[in-house]
Image (cartoon, rainbow, N blue to C red):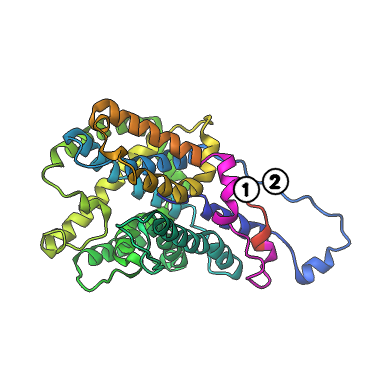
Amino acid sequence: MPNLHLAQRQISAGANTASTGTGATGTATAGAESVPAPRAKPRDPYFDNVKYAAIVLVVVGHFWNRGEGRIMDAAYLLLYAFHMPVFIMISGYFSRNFRTTEGRIGRLVATVLVPYLIFEMAYSLFDRAVGDPAHPQRLTPTDPYWIMWFLLALFIWRLTTPIWLSLRRPVPVALGLAVAATVMHGIGGDFQLRRVLQFLPFFVLGLVLKPEHFALIRRRSTRVLAVPVSLAAAVIAYWAVPRMSIAWLYHQDSATALGVSAPVGAVMTVALFVCSLALSICFLALVPGRKLPVSDLGARTISAYLLHGFVIKAVELTDWYHAPWRHTPAGQIGVTVGAVAVATLLCSSPVHKAVRFLVEPKLRWLFKDQKSQLSTPAPRM
């Protein structure tokens, strides 16, 4: 699910702002020969590949259904064990330089909060138009609609970034909050706070990661090790299908709701964090680092994340999900290929340009003295 390039836009905007001289220094150098601005740092295709692969997995996971046989259920469980954690971790990594300055707050509102409100309303209107009985005429911004929880969570996580970066041991603290969110009963449904807290450790982990950590992950020895680890995880997932509720991997329920005691819930939260982290490392190690034909698509994952829900909801209104062919091995492969095609199409440049005014609105009229921060072109992501 989600947008992995919004944080880099904010980082770039902050860097551009910091490099512009003002005040006495600017006056003293006004008569000097202007110095060309430094060129933007070349893009690393590795992270574009990671973002594209991650959004493809998100879309595939939403197209899949449980109850299609033990093998497919094992694949579903394995996918949900890491696809959102790695997505969130990368979001945290590109939020490392976020600070609550006026320019950064304005860009955060423009690229995360406003798209959240726009598409929260859009999905509600869509349900009203098609008469979806599962979501009758609802518009509740404090209760995110299905996939929209991620944007609201990202807004909250990024606002708290300075706090996490000021702590000596931020990841254990975040993991402690995740455990508390699992075992406590009094957390309401507003803002999907329980899910925000349970996924929080992955975002905070991304905040403390450094380029050298990714250099270790991308080493050949790590890639070689990732293969048997991934195969072992697939075997464990197959074994776990009849023994474990998939709801654990949605990170939105309490231990009581999942039918276990508080101590078991605490242990499961920590264990799932470790497992998800291991699978995320395997995923990151196996993603190619060279430029690929799909690398540029990783710059536009926000479009795919926000739009693919409409495709799935439209399909759900037909009998397509209940067609006999869909429950065959060939049908499952076809659904997967179709989901990859949908994700790829929605990441394409024409689609992104068509909806850019919705997913990246310009709000120069809303924020005072924010012209440079909100209008400075960010590097293409």
Q: Which residues are magenta?
A: 347-372
**Mark sitting earlier along the chain (1/2):** 2
* Distance CA(mark 1)–CA(mark 2): 10 Å
Magenta stretch contains residue 214? no
Side of 148 relative to 46 (left or right): left
Residue at 14% from the left image edge and 47% from the top image edge = 244
Residue wearing tag 2 = 39
Residue 286 rendering spot, x and y as whole percentages: 38, 33
Residue at 76% from the left image edge and 71% from the top image edge = 23
Residue wearing tag 1 = 379
Name the amino acid, label 2: Arg
Residue 291 rendering spot, x and y as whole percentages: 54, 31
Name the amino acid, label 1: Pro
Q: Residues within 10 Å of mark 2 (few under 14, many from 20)?
A: few
The quadrant of the picture occupied by the C terminus is: top right
For residue 62, above or below residue 94: above
Extreme-right residue of the structure = 31
Residue 239 rendering spot, x and y as whole percentages: 13, 38
